[in-house]
Image: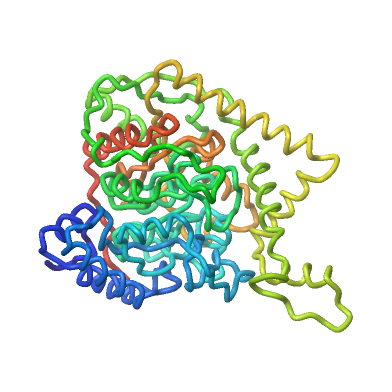
C-alpha cells in the first residue's frame, strides 16, 4: 500500500487488523511526511524514537489479538498536553525547557489504547489566539491556498498545528483543545472534522490550563467516523480531575447509522450576523436542506442572549487565565529572567513574566486581572457569569422543546492570510469565535464538519451543537451531514 499517511483512522485500523500493513510501516510513512513538511511548522517537537517503539509494541499487541481500535495508529499531540520526558511548552517562552515528569490523562489513555505519538504540535501561546500567530515557535501554516495565490494562510487557532498536520496527512489524527472554538474553527479552516465534547467528558488533568471552566480536549480527524473512534479512547472519568464526569463512555462508532429521520434540527435566527459573507449564508442554507433531505425536521429557534456571548466570554476567559497563569513566576519551573544585583522577588516576577509571556497573553492577563479587581468584580466578572447562565438556559429551553441538534456556520469566513488580521485591532480577531463561544459557555458538545469550498477554493465548515452528554447522537447527525455534503477535497501539495 502506498501513501499510508493518507489513510483515515478507520481505514488504517482495518488494514492493521487484516495484516495488510504494520504499525511500523504506517508510522514510518508519517515520519517521512513530517520531515518533508517543515515549511508548515505544524510539528514543533518530533519524537521518532518514541513513535517507533510504540509502533513495534502495537504490532505485537495486534498479533496477540488484544488491540483496541486506536492501537498502532500514528497521531500528533497538541503542545498543551503534558507528555512525560518530552518538552511541553504550551507554545510559550515562559515554559522553555519544561519536560514534565508525568503524562496528561488524555495522552496516557491514548497511549494505553496503543496509539503512536509522532510528536508535539504547534498552537497559539497558552491556547490564546484564533490564528496560530502567537506561538513562540512561529506561525503554523495552512496547507490550503487561495486559487493560484502563494500567500500563506492561517490554519486557525489555537489548535492550528493539529489542524494543519491532519489536513496535510502528516498524521492520521491529532488531539486539540477548545476553550472558545479552538478545535472547531481550525477544523473548518482546513477542511477536517473537529469535535469539542461536553465539558467534563474528557479529563483536563495534565493539560496546561487557560480557562478552567471552558477548556475541553477533543479529537481532530479526517472524518466523522474517525472522530467517533478517537473520542471514545479520550473520554472517561478521572479521579484526578474534579470536573470529570462519572459517566459510562458509549461506543460512539457503533452509533453512526446515518439515520436521522424525525430528528429536529434548530436554526437559530441570532446567528444571522450583519455582514455575513453570502457564501457562508448559502452553505448554512444548503446544510439545512441536506439534513431535511435526510429526513430531519428543520425548525427556526431563538437563542436570545447570543449577542452577549462574545463580551461575556472575553471577561470570563481572561479572568480565569489571569488566575491560572499566576503560577508562572520563575520560582518552581520554566523560565526565570536574569536578575540585576539588588533585585527582589517582585522584580523577578515582573521580569520573568515580561520576558516569558507574549503580547496576547499579557493582554488577556491584564484584562482578567482588571475584571477581577476590587470595584470591578461585580461590574464585569459577576455580570458575565450571570449572562453565561442565561446563555446556558437559552440552550436548555430549546432542547426541552424537543430540538435534537442546532445547525450553525462554524466560522464567519474561510481561512485568512497570516498577518492579515493585524494586532492593532484584537477585537477583529476575537470575532472569529462568534459562532463557537456559546458552546463553551454552556458546556455543550459541538462539532465542525467540512461542507463545501468558497469561491477561492478554500474549505468552509458547518457546526452542529448537541445536547449535553449526547455526543453519539451528535456524531450521527454529523455523519448524515458529512454523507450528504460529500466533501472530499484535499489541499494541492505545494510544501
Looking at the image, is 286 positioned above or below residue 11?
Answer: above
Residue 151, given in percent of the width and then of the height, sits at 41, 64
As drawn, the residue found furthest toward the bottom would be 341
Q: How many numbered marks, from 0 up?
A: 0
Front residue (pair 485, 54) = 54
**In-image side of 141 versus 324 (left or right):** left
Residue 405, given in percent of the width and then of the height, sits at 38, 28
**Which quarter shows the N terminus?**
bottom left
Identify the residue at image location x=42%, y=59%: 107
Identify the residue at image location x=59%, y=74%: 96
Identify the residue at image location x=55%, y=68%: 89
Q: Quadrant of residue 243?
A: top right
**In-image side of 438 versus 57 (left or right):** right
Front residue (pair 33, 196) = 196
Scheme of image coloration = rainbow
Looking at the image, is 449 positioned above or below residue 25?
Answer: above
**In-image side of 229 versus 423 (left or right):** left
As drawn, the residue found furthest toward the top would be 401
**In-image side of 59 versus 398 (left or right):** left
Residue 8, given in percent of the width and then of the height, sits at 23, 55
Q: Is residue 456 visible?
A: no
Residue 187, given in percent of the width and then of the height, sits at 39, 50
Front residue (pair 327, 205) = 205
Q: Is residue 288 visible?
A: yes
**Which quarter shows the C terminus?**
bottom left
Amino acid at each position: 500500500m502506498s501513501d499510508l499517511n493518507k489513510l483515515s483512522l478507520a481505514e488504517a485500523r482495518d488494514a492493521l487488523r487484516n495484516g495488510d500493513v504494520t504499525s511500523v510501516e504506517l508510522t514510518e510513512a508519517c515520519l517521512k511526511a513530517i520531515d518533508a513538511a517543515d515549511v508548515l511548522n505544524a510539528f514543533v517537537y518530533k519524537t521518532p524514537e518514541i513513535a517507533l517503539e510504540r509502533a513495534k509494541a502495537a504490532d505485537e499487541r495486534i498479533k496477540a489479538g488484544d488491540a483496541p481500535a486506536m492501537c498502532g495508529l500514528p497521531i500528533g499531540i497538541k503542545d498543551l498536553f503534558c507528555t512525560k520526558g518530552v518538552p511541553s511548552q504550551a507554545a510559550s517562552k515562559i515554559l522553555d525547557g519544561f519536560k514534565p515528569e508525568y503524562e496528561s490523562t488524555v495522552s496516557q489513555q491514548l497511549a494505553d489504547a496503543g496509539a503512536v505519538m509522532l510528536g508535539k504540535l504547534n498552537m497559539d501561546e497558552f491556547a490564546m489566539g484564533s490564528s496560530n500567530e502567537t506561538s513562540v515557535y512561529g506561525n503554523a501554516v495552512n496547507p490550503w491556498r487561495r486559487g493560484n495565490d502563494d500567500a500563506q494562510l492561517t490554519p486557525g487557532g489555537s489548535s492550528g498545528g493539529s489542524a494543519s498536520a491532519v489536513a496535510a496527512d502528516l498524521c492520521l489524527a491529532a488531539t486539540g483543545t477548545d476553550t472558545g472554538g479552538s478545535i472547531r474553527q481550525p477544523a473548518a479552516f482546513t477542511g477536517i472534522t473537529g469535535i469539542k465534547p461536553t465539558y467534563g467528558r474528557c479529563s483536563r488533568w495534565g493539560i496546561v490550563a487557560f480557562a478552567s471552566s471552558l477548556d475541553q480536549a477533543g479529537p481532530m480527524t479526517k472524518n466523522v467516523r474517525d472522530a467517533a473512534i478517537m473520542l471514545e479512547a479520550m473520554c472517561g472519568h478521572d479521579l484526578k480531575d474534579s470536573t470529570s464526569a462519572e459517566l459510562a463512555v458509549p461506543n460512539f462508532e457503533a452509533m453512526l447509522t446515518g439515520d436521522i429521520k424525525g430528528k429536529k434540527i434548530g436554526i437559530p435566527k441570532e446567528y444571522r450576523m450583519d455582514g455575513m459573507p453570502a457564501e457562508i449564508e448559502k452553505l448554512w442554507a444548503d446544510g439545512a436542506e441536506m439534513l431535511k433531505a435526510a429526513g430531519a425536521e428543520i425548525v427556526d429557534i431563538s437563542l436570545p442572549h447570543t449577542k452577549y456571548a462574545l463580551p461575556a466570554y472575553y471577561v470570563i476567559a481572561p479572568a480565569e487565565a489571569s488566575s491560572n497563569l499566576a503560577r508562572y513566576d520563575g520560582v518552581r519551573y520554566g523560565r526565570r529572567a536574569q536578575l540585576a544585583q539588588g533585585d527582589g522577588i517582585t522584580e523577578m516576577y515582573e521580569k520573568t513574566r515580561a520576558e516569558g509571556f507574549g503580547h496576547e497573553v499579557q493582554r488577556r492577563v491584564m484584562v482578567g486581572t482588571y475584571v477581577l479587581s476590587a470595584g470591578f468584580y461585580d461590574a464585569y466578572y459577576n455580570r458575565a457569569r450571570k449572562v453565561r447562565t442565561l446563555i446556558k438556559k437559552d440552550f436548555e429551553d430549546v432542547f426541552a422543546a424537543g430540538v435534537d441538534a442546532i445547525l450553525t456556520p462554524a466560522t464567519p469566513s474561510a481561512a485568512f492570510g497570516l498577518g492579515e488580521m493585524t494586532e492593532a485591532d484584537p477585537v477583529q480577531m476575537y470575532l472569529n469565535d462568534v459562532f463557537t463561544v456559546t458552546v463553551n459557555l454552556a458546556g455543550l458538545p459541538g462539532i465542525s464538519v467540512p461542507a463545501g469550498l468558497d469561491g477561492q477554493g478554500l474549505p468552509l465548515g458547518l457546526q452542529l451543537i448537541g445536547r449535553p452528554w449526547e455526543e453519539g447522537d451528535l456524531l450521527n447527525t454529523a455523519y448524515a451531514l458529512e454523507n450528504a455534503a460529500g466533501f472530499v477535497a484535499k489541499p494541492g501539495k505545494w510544501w
